[in-house]
Amino acid sequence: MNKEVSIIHFPGSNCDRDLAVAIKYCLKLKPKFLWHNESHIKDPGIIFIPGGFSFGDYLRAGILATKSPAIKEVIRHAKKGVPIIGICNGFQILTECKLLEGALIKNSSQLFSCKKVFLRIENKKNYFTKNIKKGVVQYPIAHSQGKFYVDDYNLKKLQDNDQIMFKYSSKTGDISDKYNPNGSVQNIAGIVNKKKNVLGLMPHPERAIDSFSGRDGIVFFNGLNELI
């Protein structure tokens, strides 16, 4: 069994250490840090793309990171079925390199949003979420370009293929504009690709692993054990 977990690090990434702490605490593994110019990644295990401001979010969030050699390797491994998780800026990168549908654009408020939000888990059949016992979890968000946009045609494809994983909700799982922190289409906070091995989500489970910030992230990471 492969016990590797890899974190791709870009100039400007600032959640790579948070991810490492969560992985060590929950999975009892020391993750491998891979610099963005790695041109050959062998046996990465689960690949995480962390949050932050890769390349300063110049041009638009995530676009410059897609030009890095490591992303070519991420795409190669994704096609082979390797589990890949992009969080916040990582989600933005996954949409920019076309591993995931849609785009992350400027919040409807035009402001940076930093707070805890509730998420309803929409798909419990996928291996990223099937071990999460709760139907609603709470994770922090920290983004200004977190509004998920997809056109109607591709939205229907996401729905038909069960690719919508998380939606912003109330504590009891109600979905409405009231609980949408950034204006995302249909409150979507996280999706997977058609093959179901690539996950992108805007909220940060790695920042919810203690009694101060919340503990719902622990269940998320513990649920990844069978993928390692």
Image (cartoon, grey):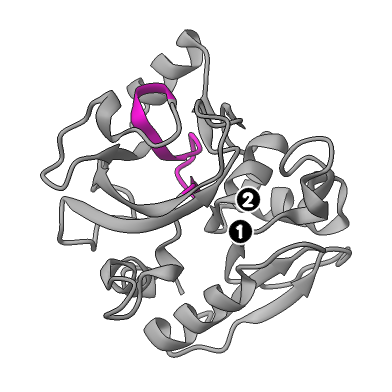
Residue at mark 1: 51
* Residue drawn at x 43%, y 90% as measured from the top left: 28
* Residue 39 picture location, percent across and down: 88, 63
* Residue drawn at x 45%, y 79% as measured from the top left: 22
Determine which quarter of the picture holds residue 47.
bottom right
Q: Is residue 174 left or right of residue 79?
A: left
Residue at mark 2: 89
Q: Nearer the viewer, residue 25 or 143?
A: 143
Dots 2, 1 in contact, CB < 8 A: yes
The numbered dot on residue 149 is none
Q: Please, is residue 211 above or below residue 30 in the view?
A: above
Q: Is residue 198 visible?
A: no
Q: Nearer the viewer, residue 195 or 90?
A: 90
* Residue 140 picture location, percent across and down: 40, 58
Secondary element type, mark 1: loop
Q: Nearer the viewer, residue 166 or 193?
A: 166
Q: Residue furthest top?
A: 153
Secondary element type, mark 2: helix
Q: Which residues are magenta?
A: 185-202
At label 1, the amino acid type is Gly
Q: Is residue 44 left or right of residue 173?
A: right
Q: Is 153 inside the magenta-drawn segment?
A: no
* Residue 64 picture location, percent across and down: 84, 44
